Every structure is written in C-alpha cells, then in structure tokens.
Image (tube, rainbow, N blue to C red):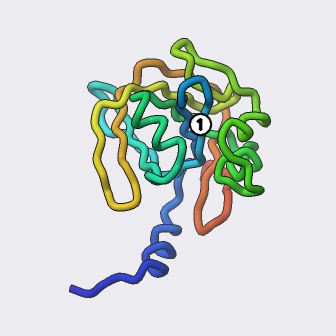
C-alpha cells in the first residue's frame, strides 16, 4: 500500500464540494465560531450531525467544554462572512461576530439570523482524529429559511443552481 502525500490528499479532497457553515459555541460568556465544510448528517433518529473541528481552535475548545454547538448553513451571499470566520484578515474570537446579524437561540448559542439552516446541538459523542476532533451532536432545535446555500470546491466559493 502506497503513502499519499498531504498536498495530493488536499487537492483530491478539494474536489468534494461542501456546504459552507459557521459552527458556533460559547466559551463562558464569549462567543466562538469557525467556518467549516466538514459537517454532515449522521442519523435521522435521533436527528444528529457531525462536525470536524481543528483541535487548536477556540471553537473546538468551547464545544468540548460547554458540550453544545450550533451549525449555521450560510446562504450563497455570505462568502465574506465565511472568509471572516475562516480567519482571513486576522480577526479572532469575539471580534468575528461584529459582522453579520448574530442572535442567541433559545439556549443562548450564537445563531446567524439569515442562515439557510441553523441546528442547535448537544454533544453526544466525541472522536479524536489526529489534528481534529469529531463532535457528534443530537439536534435539539432547528430553524430553516428559503434560499440556496453557499458551496466550496477547489478552494473557491460556488453558488448552487438546478440543472433543470
């Protein structure tokens, strides 16, 4: 069995289009958030999703400590917000939330008012995987709105359009 080098792996995985989300959490009274495309459904019963977060981020630490997180699926007009929460421009921590219409859901977690979908989750399982931690969350609250999501593929944002 051959060894796959990191750059080839990243290039290949970049071909997998992903929905762009901002995963948010609370670190005490402060909000934390990070752009993520490694988010997917796990089961319908109970309704569950998983998020993969780099273990060095404040968001990962906040989810691990608080045991809750919110997944905000971005609309196709939110590319600038996605870049902000990805750390472009050096903005960190609570300062990321100075852009966008951020509110608190019924549990106090940060939720983007114009997100296409927002999922408020309780951590049910944690899996450590090298540089990342996988959090499986049971969805306890959900909001959705009309409009297409923002997608990411080959290091670029894309808009979804139907074939017919």
Q: Position of residue 72 (x, y in %)?
A: 58, 34
Q: Is residue 63 placed above or below 83 in the rendered structure?
A: above
Which residue, as the protein is rendered here, is positioned at the far bottom? Answer: 2
Left or right of residue 106: residue 86 = right
Residue 160 appearing in the image: no
Kindly identify the residue that appears in the image at 64 percent across and 47 percent down. Answer: 150
Report the side of 81 relative to 27 (left or right).
right
49 and 68: which is toward the camera: 68
The residue lying furthest to the top in this view is 106
Position of residue 52 measured from the top left corner of the image (x, y, whole percent) = 42, 49
Report the residue marked by disc 1.
Answer: 32
Q: Nearer the viewer, residue 89 or 77?
A: 89
Residue placed at 70% from the left, 28% from the top? Answer: 114
Residue occupying the far left of the picture: 1
Residue 1 in percent (x, y) is at 20, 85
Q: Which residue is at the front of the view, 94 or 119?
A: 94
In which image quadrant can residue 49 be found?
Answer: top left
Look at the numbered disc 1 and give the secondary structure of its residue: strand
In the rendering, at what x and y percent does residue 39 appear?
45, 45
């Amino acid at each position: 069995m051959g060894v796959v080098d990191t750059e080839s792996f990243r290039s290949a995985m970049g071909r997998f289009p992903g929905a762009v989300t901002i995963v948010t959490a609370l670190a005490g009274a402060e909000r934390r958030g990070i752009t993520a495309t490694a988010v997917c459904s796990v089961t319908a019963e109970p309704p569950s999703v998983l998020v993969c977060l780099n273990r060095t981020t404040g968001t990962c630490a906040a989810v691990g400590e608080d045991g809750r997180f919110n997944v905000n699926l971005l609309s196709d007009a939110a590319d600038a917000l996605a870049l902000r929460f990805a750390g472009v421009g050096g903005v960190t921590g609570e300062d990321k939330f100075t852009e966008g219409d951020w509110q608190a859901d019924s549990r106090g977690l940060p939720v983007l008012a114009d997100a296409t979908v927002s999922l408020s989750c309780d951590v049910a399982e944690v899996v450590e995987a090298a540089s990342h931690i996988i959090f499986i969350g049971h969805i306890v609250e959900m909001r959705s709105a009309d409009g297409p999501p923002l997608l990411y593929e080959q290091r670029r944002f894309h808009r979804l359009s139907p074939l017919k």
